[in-house]
């Protein structure tokens, strides 16, 4: 039991934040500064128990500064238990779709994503992940294929866009020497960007002066938290610096990918906590950015689903332990945290596709005030209702 407490203490210390805790973020800033922007954090597999474990091991979490809290029902169109592809697609398109789908609806036809809407509005865009950038969650924002395992095709979708920031793993899917068709997607996405492949190269950059940035830090998947460099917090800070060069706002998706993997592995609690705290440090970076640089930034933190059926229970000595019920995904709702302009729209219980449609409306309209003004001009109340479920 003492060993468990020591391990948890070490995990928390390893992920200690270099920044002071942020004060609570405003739901809607009194005088928002800068163009409307969105930072969407997706904690893959991060159900309530994961955040509970992190809270029990740390004195304070970054998410505590986000004043709006809700729950999200994350089912797919064909299954009560979803996967990352279907759920991320619901967030990216506002359409609930089938298990394994990437950026397509239940009919397998492409559906416009919030990243594509942002590009159409000439906002800057970015994808950051601790997995391959062709993995289910980041792929769902920039590609349209019926199967999440089509990594080479997802890479084509990503390369077809004009995305200012791409940071994560998955170099092989863009590399002509490793692609079965020999197409050079790597040159396509790096020819006008600063390109880095190591933590040393990344840290040597002044990201405030870089207009475009591509970083592949592994051929496939980066290592777990603790041995992963650069950290997700560093990548998030760099991405925000690059995207801030644009004066039309930006959309950034940041995924804490490997929380889910620790759940699938039924990993020791220290490993789970390490991933969640690593993700929380990235959220702190966005909170610092919102507070110090652009208050007109919506920060939204969600999960695509929960994994492993993680439960926490204490023994007679008051030591909490982890218990898993499965190695797969589970059916419970997941937590949502939000702060900044438009945050109040996301409180309460929502379906994942409704969260996606709210995001699309905010980005399409350039923020909550503009969206309400457009609705007022048309004589319609600005509300987005959830459609009837397909089953």
Image (cartoon, grey):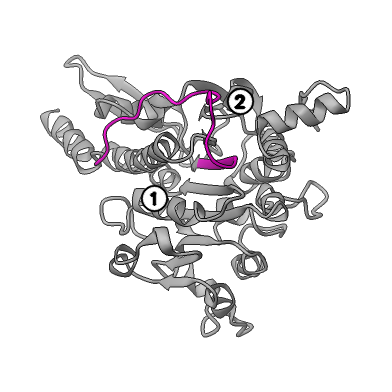
Residue 30, image x, y percentages: 53, 23
Does 54 sit left or right of 348 as displayed? left
Give the foreground label among 2 and 1: 1
Give yes or no for residue 38 being in the magenta stretch.
yes
Residue with the most extreme right position? 378
| 206 displayed left or right of 360 | left
Mark 2 lies on a secondary structure that is: helix
Q: Is residue 328 visible?
A: no
- 148 part of magenta stretch: no
Using the image, determine if residue 17 lies above or below residue 218: above
Q: Give the x, y percent position of residue 43.
A: 47, 40
Q: Quadrant of residue 317?
A: top left
- Mark 2 touches mark 1? (CB < 8 Å): no
Q: Nearer the viewer, residue 20 or 280?
A: 20
Towards the viewer: 32 or 17: 32
Q: Give the image quarter of residue 377.
A: top right
Q: Tell me the number on the disc at residue 346.
A: 2
Q: Which residue is mark 1?
A: 237
User: Mark on residue 319?
Assistant: none
Give the CA separation, mark 2 to mark 1: 25 Å
The picture quadrant where one finds residue 143 is bottom right
Q: Which residues are magenta?
A: 18-41
Q: What's the magenta bit mostly, secondary-structure-wise?
A: loop
């Amino acid at each position: 039991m003492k060993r468990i407490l020591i391990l948890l203490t070490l995990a928390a210390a390893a992920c200690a934040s270099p920044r002071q805790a942020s004060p609570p973020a405003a739901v809607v800033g009194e005088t928002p500064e800068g163009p409307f922007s969105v930072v969407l954090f997706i904690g893959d597999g991060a159900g309530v128990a994961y955040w509970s474990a992190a809270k029990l091991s740390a004195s304070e979490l970054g998410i505590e500064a986000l004043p709006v809290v809700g729950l999200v029902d994350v089912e797919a169109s064909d299954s009560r238990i979803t996967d990352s592809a279907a759920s991320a697609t619901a967030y990216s398109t506002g359409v609930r779709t089938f298990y394994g789908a990437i950026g397509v609806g239940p009919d397998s036809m492409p559906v416009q994503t919030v990243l594509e809407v942002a590009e159409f509005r000439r906002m800057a865009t970015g994808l950051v992940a601790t997995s391959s950038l062709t993995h289910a969650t980041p792929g769902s924002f920039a590609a349209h294929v019926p199967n999440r395992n089509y990594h080479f095709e997802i890479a084509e979708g990503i390369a077809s866009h004009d995305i200012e920031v791409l940071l994560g793993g998955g170099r092989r899917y863009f590399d002509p020497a490793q692609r079965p068709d020999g197409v050079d997607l790597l040159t396509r996405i790096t020819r006008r960007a600063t390109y880095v492949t190591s933590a040393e190269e990344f840290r040597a950059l002044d990201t405030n002066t870089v207009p475009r940035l591509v970083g592949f830090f592994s051929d496939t998947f980066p290592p777990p938290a603790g041995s992963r460099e650069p950290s997700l917090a560093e990548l998030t800070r760099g991405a925000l610096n690059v995207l801030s060069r644009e004066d039309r706002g930006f959309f950034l998706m940041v995924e804490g990918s490997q929380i889910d993997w620790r759940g699938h592995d039924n990993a020791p609690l220290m490993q789970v906590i390490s991933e969640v705290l690593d993700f929380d440090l990235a959220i702190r970076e966005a909170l610092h950015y919102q507070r110090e640089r652009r208050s007109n930034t919506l920060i939204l933190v969600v999960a695509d689903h929960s994994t492993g059926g993680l439960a926490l229970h204490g023994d007679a000595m008051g030591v909490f332990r982890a218990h898993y019920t499965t190695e797969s995904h589970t059916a419970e709702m997941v937590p949502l945290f939000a702060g900044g302009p438009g945050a109040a729209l996301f409180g309460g219980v929502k379906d994942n596709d409704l969260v996606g449609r709210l995001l699309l409306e905010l980005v399409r309209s350039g923020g909550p005030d503009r969206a309400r003004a457009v609705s007022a001009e048309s004589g319609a109340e600005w509300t987005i209702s959830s459609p009837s479920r397909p089953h």
